[in-house]
Image: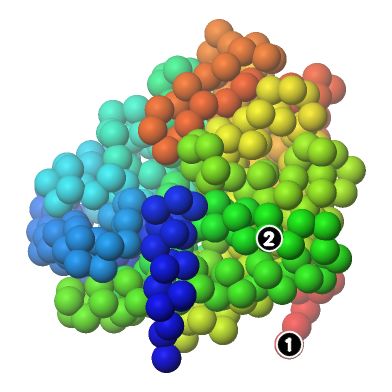
Amino acid sequence: MITTSEILETIEMISQQHLDIRTITMGISLRDCGHPDLKTCCDRIYDKVTRRAENLVRTGEDIEREFGIPIVNKRISVTPIAIACESCDTGDYAPFARILDRVAKEVGVNFIGGFSALVQKGFTKGDEKLIRSIPEALCTTERVCSSVNVGSTRAGINMDAVALMGRIVRETADRSDGQGCAKLVVFCNAVEDNPFMAGAFHGVGEPECVINVGVSGPGVVHSALKKCAGEPLNVAAEVIKKTAFRVTRMGELVAQEASRRLGVPFGIVDLSLAPTPAVGDSVADILEELGLESVGAPGTTAALALLNDAVKKGGVMASSNVGGLSGAFIPVSEDAGMIRAAAAGRLTIEKLEAMTCVCSVGLDMIALPGDTSAETIAAVIADEAAIGMINQKTTAVRVIPVPGKTVGDFVDFGGLLGRAPVMAVSPASPAAFIHRGGRIPAPINSLKN
C-alpha cells in the first residue's frame, strides 16, 4: 500500500531533486523497408516510421501531464540502416539519414537513432557504405544519431573498423566544427535495446515495434546519501539500492502506461543514472558525497563501482524487464561535477578510462584538441573496446575533436549536450599500431559453450 509519506517523498524527488524520465524511445523495425530503388526505400522508411510514431510525442506529453512526472525526451530508434537498406542500389547512404531527419521533425522527436553498422567481425558492402557516409549524414541533419559496433567479447576487435572510425570521427569534426561528433558513438558489445542517444538502435532480435524507457535521478541519489553522511559504505550502498528501486518503479509505471496507450509491447527499463549539466543532477556529486574531495581523486573508481552495483541491485527488483545499459553514465560535458573536476585538472582521460571499467558505457562527450590525429582517436577507441571485450561489458567512445581549440579552452555544445573543457590526450603516437590493421582475437573468456 502506498503511504502519504511515500507520495510526498516522490513529489519532493520530482520538484527539488531533478527526478525525471529521461526518455521514452520507440524502437521500430525497418527490415521490411529495403528495396533496390533509393526513392522507394526512402518512401517505405518514411511511411512506416511516421505511421508507427505519429502518436508517440502526444502520448508522452499526456502521461507527463496526467501523472505529473517529467518526461524529458521522446525518441525513436530503428534497425541499423546498414542492415535495413543494404539491398538498395546506391553508394551513398546519406539520403537515408536525411529521410530519418525529416521523419523525426515531423513526428516531433528530438533524436532518431539507428544510422548504424555492426562490424565487430568484418564489413559487408552495406556496412562500409554506411560508415563512409557518416560525415555527410551527420553534417546535413539535425536529429539523426549514428553508431558503429567495432568489437565484442565473442568476436574480438575489428581493428580495420577501428582505424576507419578514427578517420570518420576526424572528418566529421572537421566538417561540422566538432558538433557532428556529439551524435556519433563507437561501441564494443553494443546492446540491442538501448533507449539512450546517441547510441540507440533497434536490434535485429527485437520485435516489430517496442517501447523502451530510460530513467534518471542522480539528484535523488545524491540527496538520499546526504542523510547518511559518515556512515559505512555498506550503509550507503543500501540507501542507493532503495532509492534506485523507487526511481525504477516510476520508470516501470510510465513504460507500462505508454505501452498500453500506444498499443506497442513494453520492452525494457534502462536503469542508468544519466546526468545533465544542471546543478544538482550530477553523478560526480554522488561520488563526492561518498567522501571524495573531488571526482578524479584516488578512490573514484571504487566509489563508482559501489554506485553502479547498488543502482542495478535496487533497480532490478523494481521492474519486470530491465535492459539497455543500466548503470551510471559519466559524460564529461553533460555532468556539472565532471566539468568542474576536468576544468580544475583533477579528472583526466586516463582516470576516466579506468572508471569505465566499472560503469555504463565509456569515454563519453569528451572534447579533444582540434589537432588530435585520426590514429590517436582510433587508439582511444581501441583501448575502450579492449576494456569492453575483456570484461564482457558494453563500452563506447564519443569524443569530439574541436577544430581550432586547444587544452583548457571551453566548448559549448548546447542544451542537454552541455559544455566541456578541452582535455589533454597523450602526444605519443600510436600510428604504427593502428596501421597494422587486422583483428584482435576474442579473449579466452569468450569460450562459454
Q: Is residue 185 left or right of residue 100?
A: right
Q: From this viewpoint, is residue 351 visible? A: no
Residue position for label 2: 227
What residue appears at the point 63 percent right and 48 percent down from the top-left corner?
283
* Residue to which mark 1 is pinned: 449
x and y, in percent, of residue 266 in the image? 33, 79
Q: Is residue 139 left or right of residue 315?
A: left
Q: Which of the two residues, 262 or 29, is positioned nearer the viewer here?
A: 262
Q: Amino acid at mark 2?
A: Lys
Tell me, yes or no, whether the two marked residues, 2 and 1, touch with CB atoms within 8 Å.
no
Q: Residues within 10 Å of mark 2 (few under 14, many from 20)?
A: few
Where's residue 238, x and y in %?
A: 72, 73
**Residue drawn at (52%, 19%) of the image:** 411
Where is residue 113? Give x, y as percent: 36, 51
Residue pictured at 31% horizontal, 66% vertical: 27
In the picture as drawn, the residue positioned furthest to the bottom comes out as 1
